[in-house]
Image: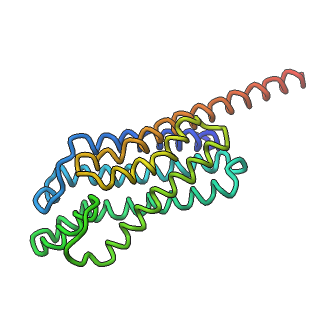
């Protein structure tokens, strides 16, 4: 199999769609996070899928940026970097939720409870250390990156503009939902998840059209040479 820019772009589109589907799927029926549920097999599995989601999203956003790097300009670069930081921290904190916190839930339940409170938008009663700073960085980068990168994609006029607008608007929606109870907090994933799916499908379609156009030009050149 020959690896071409078109192949990589399609793979990035597929990764974005997969990330969006996982983003929605892991939130459906999600149990309330506490010291007891964090050690359950279900929550560990959900967090494992969230780690995969973050990795796929990073691949998808990279493809979106590189496929139209000139059109994205400086705004696109800033948005891509900030949003990538957001998803990298999501990957890291989710890994901690899935594999570190369960290991210390029995020995230090108060710390685990405080971290989970901060994760779900509450205020911890104790000191969560560096985790608190990382979660603040994650929230800022996720919201600001989505807004900036979404605006850049919208202005580039290459991928589906409704999906780019939803990615940008998702930050505002997420900020509002983050102060609501846990049942509403789970809805945070939906705007960006739908945007990921829409942008991923659009990226795949754009790569396909470019490939078909290049093939047509190549055939015409071959016929002309004959």
Q: Is residue 95 left or right of residue 8?
A: left
Quarter of the figure with the N terminus: top right
| Residue ID at (28%, 65%) | 96
Image height check: is 108 above or below 38?
A: below
How far from the left and from the top, in percent, is residue 219? 78, 24
How many marks the image carries: the answer is 0
Q: Is residue 159 left or right of residue 131?
A: right
Q: Nearer the viewer, residue 44 or 72?
A: 72
Give the colour scheme of this rendering: rainbow
How far from the left and from the top, in percent, is residue 52? 37, 51
Q: Is residue 205 left or right of residue 50?
A: right
Image height check: is 89 above or below 56?
A: below
Q: Nearer the viewer, residue 157 or 13?
A: 157
Q: Nearer the viewer, residue 172 or 219?
A: 172
Q: Nearer the viewer, residue 196 or 103?
A: 196
How far from the left and from the top, in percent, is residue 218? 79, 29
Residue 221 picture quarter: top right
Image height check: is 191 above or below 138?
A: above
Quarter of the figure with the C terminus: top right
Q: Residue furthest right?
A: 225
| Residue ID at (15%, 52%) | 41
How far from the left and from the top, in percent, is residue 25? 30, 40
| Residue ID at (39%, 54%) | 175
């Amino acid at each position: 199999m020959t690896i071409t820019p078109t192949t990589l772009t399609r793979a990035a589109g597929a990764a974005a769609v997969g990330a969006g589907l996982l983003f929605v799927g892991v939130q459906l029926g999600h149990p309330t996070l506490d010291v007891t549920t964090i050690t359950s097999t279900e929550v560990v599995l959900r967090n494992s899928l969230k780690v995969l989601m973050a990795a796929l999203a990073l691949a998808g956003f990279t493809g979106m940026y590189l496929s139209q790097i000139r059109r994205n300009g400086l705004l696109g670069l800033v948005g891509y970097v900030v949003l990538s930081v957001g998803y990298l921290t999501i990957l890291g904190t989710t890994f901690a939720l899935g594999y570190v916190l369960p290991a210390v839930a029995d020995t230090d339940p108060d710390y685990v409870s405080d971290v989970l409170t901060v994760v779900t938008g509450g205020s911890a009663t104790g000191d969560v250390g560096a985790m608190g700073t990382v979660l603040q960085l994650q929230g800022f980068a996720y919201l600001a990156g989505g807004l900036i990168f979404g605006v850049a994609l919208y202005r580039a006029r290459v991928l589906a503009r409704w999906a780019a607008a939803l990615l940008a608007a998702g930050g505002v929606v997420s900020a509002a939902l983050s102060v609501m109870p846990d049942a509403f907090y789970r809805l945070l994933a939906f705007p960006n998840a739908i945007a990921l799916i829409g942008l991923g499908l659009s990226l795949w379609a754009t790569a396909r059209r470019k490939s078909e156009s290049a093939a047509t030009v190549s055939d015409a050149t071959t016929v002309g040479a004959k």
